[in-house]
Structure formats: C-alpha cells, structure tokens
Image (cartoon, rainbow, N blue to C red):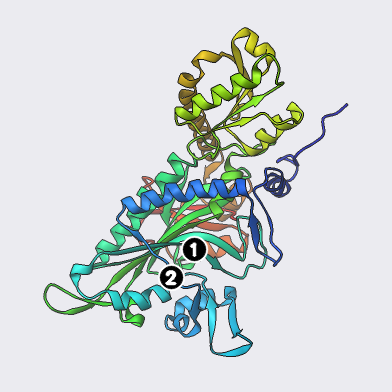
Amino acid sequence: MAKARVLTPKSESFPDWYQDVIAKAELAENGPARGTMVIRPYGWAIWERMQAEVDRRIKDAGAQNAYFPLFIPESYLHKEAEHVEGFSPELAVVTHGGGKELEEPLVVRPTSETVINAYFSKWLQSYRDLPLLINQWANVVRWELRPRLFLRTTEFLWQEGHTCHASEADARDYALRILSEVYEQFMVDVLAIPVLTGAKTENERFAGADQTWTCEAMMGDGKALQMGTSHLLGQNFAKVFDTQFLTEAGEREYAWQTSWGVSTRMVGGLIMVHGDDAGLRLPPALAPVQVVVVVVRDEGGAGEKAEALAKQLKAAEIRTELDARDTPFGRRAVEWELKGVPVRIELGPRDIASGNAIVVRRDRAEKETTPLDGLPVRLPEVLDEIQQSLMQQAKDRQEHRTADVATVGEAVGAARTGFARMPWDGAGELEDKLNQEGVSVRCLRRTDGSVPLSSDEDDLVAVVARAY
C-alpha cells in the first residue's frame, strides 16, 4: 500500500507546501478577521526563542525596552508628509469609541516613529541625554490585500527600535551596527540563514527615511525575503516633532535618528529556507526542542531508560522532551519530523537489551545506532554539526542560484530560479524596467560585497530577484 502523503511536495507547489507545513506542524492558523493569525503554542515557542535572542543582542547594543500606545492620533501621521503618504493605503483608522464618534480619528499603530517622537521631544533636553536608545516589542496593523501566514498579515508582531543621536555620523553608525551586530549575526548564527546586507534604492526606502539598509535571504524557491531593515531617519521626524537638544556649545539642534525592526516574518523565512518535504528543519540554536526521546514500545525497561536519558540531557542544558505517549510510534515519528526537531532518539526493548539507541538527525534523515552511555557527551557535538549543516546547505543553494548578468533580460531570466547580480546604473531607469517584469532590486552592495553608506555611491552592484 502506498504511503499517505502528509505534505504537498515542494516541487509540485511551493505555496501549498508552505501552508501545509504551517498547518501540520501546528504553527499557526488564520484568525477570524481577514489577514489575522492565531499563533499556536509550537509556533509561539519558536517566536519566543527568536525574541529572546534578538532582545539580548539589542540590549548588548545599549538599547532599553519600553512600550508606546497602540492608538496614535491621526494628526501625528500627517505631520511628516512622506511618512503618511507611504502608509496611507495600509492604515486602519478608528472613528468611533464608546458608542460615540471620536473628535479625532485614531490610527492603529502601523509603526511608531510619530508617537515615539512626541515623547522624545519631552525627554530629550541636552547632549548629555544622547544617545537615546529605545526599543519596543509590540503588534502593528497594516491593512494587507493578499495575506499569507507569517509573511504578510494585517496584524503582526515585531520589535521596533527608535534612537536619537548628536550627529548624522553617530546615527548612521548605530543603524549599521544594528544591521550587522544584531540582525545579521542573529540570522546567520541562530537561524542558520545566510543573508545579503545592503542599501535599499530610493524607491524602496522606508517612508520618511534618508536611507534604508536591509537583510535579504533566498528562500527555497529562489525568491527573496526581506528579513529585517534598519533606517537612517536623518532629522526628518525630529523637525516636525521638535525633537531638539542643547549642544555642548549651548545651541539648540535637531536630533539625528534611526529606526529598525524585525518581525514574525522571520518565522516564514525559517520555514522556507530550511523546510523539506517532511516538514520543518529547525537549527538547534533556535529549536525549542533540540532533542526528543521517543519510547518505541514501553517494554523491557525502555520507558524508564528513556526518562532517565531525558533527565540527563536536560541536566546537560540540552532542550529535551520525552515522548512516551500511548499512540502508534510511526505517527509520533512523523509528527516530530514535521516539527523539525533536530535530533530524535528512539528507544525500544531491543535497544535497551543491546545498550544502544537509534539516533535520527533531522538535517539528513539518517538513522545511526549509538551507544546509550555516550549520548549526553556526544549530542552537543551532533547539534553543532546540524547547525553548520543547515547553514552550509542554505549557502550552497544561494551561491548556486545566483548569477552575474549584464542586461535586464538576463536578470529576469536568472530571477526565475534565484538571484541576479548586475551593475547599478544609479539613475533608476534599470529599476523601472525590472519592476515592469515583476522583478525588484533587493539591495545595493559594493563590488567587494560590503555595505554602502548610501545608495548614491559609485560602482554599486544591484541584487535582483522576485520577492515575497
């Protein structure tokens, strides 16, 4: 009898495979209002791990966490013309409350530059208060026409950092520090996702920013996903909200600012970079459960030995779960594969009798018979190998599917399966032609692969792709 198909194969339909993984791995479901999502416990555990790792790096960069209101007076957004123009199509606006029409409509937070600046202008007095480094973890609402779980939802979760500095150079340096030391480091070291960092074109900049830098990753289908952005806001918001400080020379000056954020979109990226036809494949550095000990059949002391092993592994600070449920072993094995747990240890009466265990690595679905006694010592090394393996597989795919091209036609052709690199014309004509073909400039990089300070530098290379 043919084995029942659990997921749509990636090669058959990548979008259907993606939705299947989210459903079968019990990550999330669509909410009752269009474009919203319910994040289930396992999906939330993954997001919590992301939060913890990013939050630690943000605090290491000197920022402190705070919280600002969900509702923003509509007049705040109208103070910065480019900002409101950029967000107008996505705004959710509250006009009634308590059964009455509001004197002023309230915008449901799409981002917080405006409301935070209203308070920065109160808190910032002199150069001694700088740099002022604030971050908040919150939900935001942007009315989404084509929602897709984790990737584009009307309401999503994120962190947004907002800072004030004494000079443009200080602000730029901090925005780039967040890009490299927080976002890129986290995505590479924890998510095992290679990212390309670079500057956004003028057309792709955040509304109201002088410059935007981005982390772009290649998904399993060759498309690009913007994983996180960091913005140099200049003095644009400071001027409209009167965010000034007294310099050492006793003069009043507008603050130089940044903002930066990553969101639950990273969960979607994680799925699409590492997932296979059996489900998720989680890098051990992130996985809520790094090792699951599965009792194949509770006979011959297998249950007791599995419980003891799970305790040993937890004592060794390996995130471990014991699965001794009274359900068929095959069903449980498929479930743990779907959830992407890096290592599955199978213990049955035969294994106990031989003093061995079956170790299954999720990165390559290979079974290995291993002595039970050495497992607590051996597993940290195995987990590290899996982390490096997933990273290398993603890097190999990105390199294999990236082509150097010279024309728009060649770029469009390369973007059918991956990324293209081509010289940037600096004038925007190239970008317009690419956009007409459904392809976009994901970022601009220097020829040596480093991040430019602005999109106006000479001799830049454009990374071109189809994008989510």
Is 257 rendered above or below residue 460? Answer: below
Q: What is the crowding at mark 2: few (fewer than 14 residues within 10 Å), some, or many (at least 20)?
A: some
Closest to the observer, 181 or 102? 102
Closest to the observer, 3 or 396? 3
Q: What is the crowding at mark 1: few (fewer than 14 residues within 10 Å), some, or many (at least 20)?
A: some
Residue at figure coordinates x 19%, y 70% from the top left: 127
Residue at figure coordinates x 55%, y 46% from the top left: 46
Name which residue type carries label 1. Ala
Residue at mark 2: 68
Query: Is 246 on the left or on the right of 374, as rendered?
Result: left
Where residue 143 sits, quadrant-wise, is bottom right
Residue 447 makes an appearance in the image: yes
Q: Are marks 1 and 2 in contact (CB under 8 Å)?
A: yes
Query: Is 209 on the left or on the right of 246, as rendered?
Result: right
Say the numbered circle drawn on residue 254: none
Is 173 rendered above or below residue 415? Answer: below
Coordinates of residue 446 in the picture (x, y in percent) = 37, 51
Residue 452 makes an appearance in the image: no
Query: Is 165 on the left or on the right of 348, as rendered?
Result: left
Quadrant (top left/top right/bottom left/bottom right) for the C terminus? bottom right
Classify mark 1: helix, strand or loop.
strand
Classify mark 2: helix, strand or loop.
loop
Q: Residue furthest top?
A: 354
Name which residue type carries label 2. Phe
Is 49 rendered above or below residue 346? Answer: below
Residue at mark 1: 138
Closest to the observer, 240 or 346? 346
Closest to the observer, 182 or 214? 182
Which is nearer the N-term, disc 1 or disc 2? 2
Coordinates of residue 289 in the picture (x, y in percent) = 55, 36
